[in-house]
Image (cartoon, helix red, strand yellow):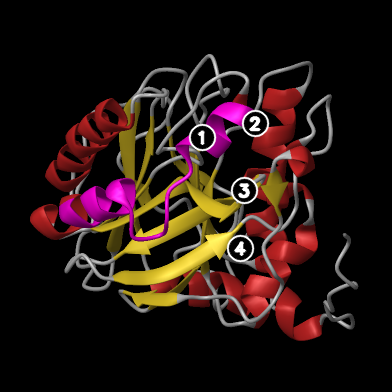
């Protein structure tokens, strides 16, 4: 089939490998704008210090493989069963021990670090919060999970407060506008579109994707769908077993999985470029052609 004008570069983007790969690949030849994006997966525990030690190790590995940003899972600060009362007891302020040490990891490694923590809300509830620290260790974005996981037998709303829906906090990196969403939010396509309406073209999705029948298929399908329908890059980082299914991945705007991990703790890196984004949007101008907007519903108490 002949190529048409604007189709250049529409093959899969450069990556550090697919499932289970551990060796980095350099950016495409001649590229001057590619940004190394890493997803890192591990199994957080109730030991926050041990979690931070593993995150430091994985961050150093991400840097060695060429990353300038690394995404860790939801609940990276603390994870134990039952999550509700244990998480409430482990909740911290946004400038508490975990966030302070995470900022130190970002600063010492000169990399942007994004991860999930359990944030204080009130005496009976916590927020499921994402934080992003830049390479100077400065907090550049925060996101509190909007959709609570009252599904598949879970009842997050018993212990968790939903974040307010306002203008999303974003930050800039290598020509991209970066936005955040969490785990169960990926089942609601309007969340990613809400970010895109704010100018986001690189979406980060820390998760603790609970295993179960068909859940791996749901995870893989939904992450890829959010990239395709919004013509954006998506970087999704999950827990490894027992809390999650693993399968962390980076997906390009055509829905190509350009880097992924299997079930083991690891880091993978993809080199993404605004040029690739522009090329995809030239041949698939879906955002420009849409006829519906996203507006928030009244808050549910």
Kindly indicate the quadrant of the structure image that contains residue 196: bottom right
User: Regarding mark 3 in the picture, which secondary structure is present there?
Assistant: loop
Q: CA distance from mark 3 to mark 4?
A: 63 Å
The kind of secondary structure element at disc 4 is loop
Residue farthest toward the front in the current orientation of the protein: 123
Task: Say whether disc 4 or disc 2 marks the residue closer to the N-terminus.
Answer: 4
Residue of label 1: 89
Circle 2 residues within 10 Å: few <14, some 14–19, many ≥20? many
- Residue bearing the label numbered 3: 123
- Residue 146 position, x and y percent, is 70, 58
Quarter of the image where one finds residue 195: bottom right
- How dense is the environment of label 4, judged by Cα within 10 Å: few (below 14), some, or many (20 and up)? few
The image's mark for residue 31 is none
Q: Residue at x 44, y 64 (%)?
A: 9
Numbered circle sitting on residue 84:
2
Disc number lying in front (3 or 2): 3
**Which of marks 1 and 3 precedes in the sequence?**
1
- Is residue 93 covered in magenta? yes
Kindly report which numbered mark, 4 or 2, lies closer to the viewer in this rendering.
2
- For marks 3 and 2 on the same chain, the one whose residue lies earlier in the sequence: 2
Q: How would you rate the neighbour count of disc 1 (Cα within 10 Å): few for under 14, some for 14-19, many for 20 or more?
A: some
Q: Secondary structure at mark 1?
A: helix
Say above or below: 60 vs 204: above
Q: Give percent across and percent down for residue 294.
A: 82, 77
């Amino acid at each position: 089939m002949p190529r048409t004008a604007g189709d250049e570069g529409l093959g899969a983007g450069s990556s550090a490998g697919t499932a289970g790969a551990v060796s980095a690949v350099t950016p495409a030849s001649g590229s001057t704008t590619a940004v190394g994006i890493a997803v890192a997966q591990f199994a957080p525990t109730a030991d926050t210090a041990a979690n931070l030690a593993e995150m430091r190790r994985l961050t150093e590995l991400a840097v060695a493989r060429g990353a300038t940003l690394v995404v860790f899972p939801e609940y990276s600060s603390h994870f134990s069963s039952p999550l509700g009362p244990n998480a409430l007891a482990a909740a911290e302020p946004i400038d508490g021990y975990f966030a302070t040490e995470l900022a130190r990891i970002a600063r010492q490694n000169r990399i942007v670090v994004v991860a999930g923590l359990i944030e204080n809300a009130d005496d009976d509830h916590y927020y499921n919060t994402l934080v992003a620290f830049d390479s100077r260790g400065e907090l550049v974005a925060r996101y509190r999970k909007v959709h609570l996981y009252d599904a598949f037998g879970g009842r997050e709303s018993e212990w968790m407060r939903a974040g307010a829906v306002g203008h999303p906090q974003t930050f800039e990196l290598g020509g991209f506008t970066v936005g955040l969403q969490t785990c169960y939010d990926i089942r609601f396509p309007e969340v990613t579109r809400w970010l895109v309406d704010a100018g986001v073209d690189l979406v980060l999705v820390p998760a603790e994707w609970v295993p179960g029948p068909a859940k791996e298929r749901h995870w893989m399908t939904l992450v890829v769908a959010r990239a395709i329908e919004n013509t954006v890059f998506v970087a999704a980082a999950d827990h490894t077993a027992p809390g999650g299914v693993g399968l962390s991945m980076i997906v390009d705007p055509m829905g190509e999985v350009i880097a992924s991990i299997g079930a083991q703790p690891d880091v993978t890196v993809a080199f993404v470029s605004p040029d690739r984004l522009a090329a995809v949007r030239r041949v698939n101008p879906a955002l420009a052609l849409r006829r519906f907007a996203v507006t928030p519903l009244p808050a549910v108490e």
